[in-house]
Image: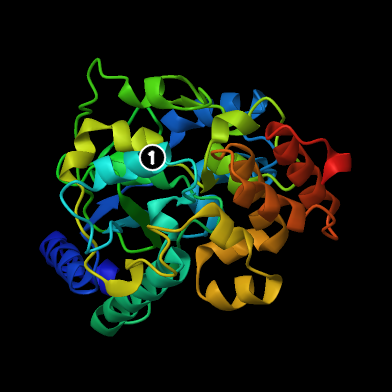
Amino acid sequence: MSFFSEKSAVDLQNLAHTIKSWGRELGFADVAIADIDLSADEAGLQSWLQAGYHGEMDYMAAHGMKRARPAELVAGTVRVISARMDYLPAAAGADWRAREQGRLADGNAAVISVYARGRDYHKVLRNRLQQLAERIAAEVGEFGYRVFTDSAPVMEIPLAAHAGLGWRGKHTLLLNRHAGSMFFLGEIFTDLPLPVDQPVSAHCGQCQACMDICPTQAIIGPYRLDARRCISYLTIELKGSIPLDLRPLIGNRILGCDDCQLACPWNKFAQRAALPDFDVRNGFDNAELIELFAWDEQEFAQRLEGSAIRRIGYERWLRNIAVGLGNADPSAEVVAALRAKSEHGSGLVREHVAWALERHGLAASQA
C-alpha cells in the first residue's frame, strides 16, 4: 500500500508543510500546491492561439489543450507543486530600476534582460526541483512525479496563480505582493494528493503602467499579449528577420525586454536572489553594443557557456546587436563596427547590418 493511500489528511498536511520548508532550504522563495483543474483557462489559451499571437512558437500549439490538462501530459498527476525563485542579482542596489532605465536611455549600452545575465535558469531550477523531489521520495518512498522548468507544454502562470503564489498581471506575468515579478517558476507534477493552497486576489486595480510603457505596444489589452510584437519574442524566439517597422522600437535591447517590469509599481518589492547563480556574468549590467558585437563565434560560445543566451546562437546574437547599433547614437565607431560585419557569412546578419548602416546615412554600397 502506498504512502498516500494509507496516510491520513493530517499526515499529508504535514508532508505539504515539510515540502515547502525543504523548498526554501533549496533556494526557492516560495512553494505552494495547486490542483490540476485549468478548465477555466482553456478558452483563453485557445483564442490566443487561434489569433496567431504565438507567432512562430509552433510548440505553443503543437500539444493542443494538453498544456491546460496536466494529467494528459503526465498520467496520474493530481497535484502540481509550484515554486518560484527570485533572480534579481544580490548586488542590485535599491535604485536598480532607475539604473536600468538609465541604461535604456544610453544609446551605446547593450541592454540584456536581467533574468539572462547570470547562469541558465533552466539548469538551476531543474536541479533544485529534482533535489526537492528526491527528498520527498526519501520521505514517502517511490512516487510518481515529473519536474518542469519552462521546458514543456505547462501553463506555469495559471498553475502558480492557482497555488496562491501570486496573480496574473496585466502584462501576463505573475505578480506577488512581496516580490513583484522578478522571479522564475518551476513545477513538480505529482500523484501525491497533497492539500492545495488557496489563490490570492489580484491587485493591479486600474493601473496599466505596463501597457503604457511597452515600446512596441505588444500588450494589446489587459492580460493579452501579442507575442509577435514583444521584444522578448523578437530577440529570442524569432529565427528570421525582425520586421522593419519594429526595429527602431527595439532600441538597444539586444536580448529580452524588462520595460513592463520596470514600470510595474509592485517591483519596488522585488527580492534579491538567494543563490549566486544569478549574479551578473560578463559585465552584462554594464556592457556596450560595440564591445559585444566584436565577439567572434568562439568567444560567444566560450563566454556564454552555461548561459541561457547561448540558446539563440551566434547568428541571432549578431542580428540583435546590429539592430541595436542601427538605433545607437551616431559615431564613427558605430559605423566602423557595422562595416566590419557587412560581409558576414550569414545573410540574416548582413541584412540587419545593411539596415543599421542605412539608419546612419550609409547605403549598403558604401559599407
Q: Looking at the picture, how far across and down is residue 153, in whole percent?
A: 56, 50
Q: Quick one: which residue is furthest to the right in this view?
A: 365
Query: Which amino acid type is shown beneath numbered disc 1?
Result: Pro
Asked whether, in this view, residue 137 is left or right of residue 325, the answer is left
Left-right relation of 31 to 131? left
Q: Nearer the viewer, residue 240 or 206?
A: 240
Q: Can residue 33 be seen in this view?
A: yes
Where residue 99 appears, x then y in whole percent?
28, 45
Q: Which residue is drawn at 15% across and 49% down?
A: 94
Position of 86 relative to 15 (above/below): above
Q: Residue drawn 39% across and 71% down?
A: 124
| Nearer to us in this view, 19 or 90 | 90
- In the image shown, does 160 or 175 lie closer to the viewer? 175
Is residue 311 toward the left or the right of residue 169 in the image? right
Residue shown at 36% from the left, 55% from the top: 184
Horizontal and vertical percent position of residue 123: 45, 71
Q: Name the residue under label 1.
A: 158
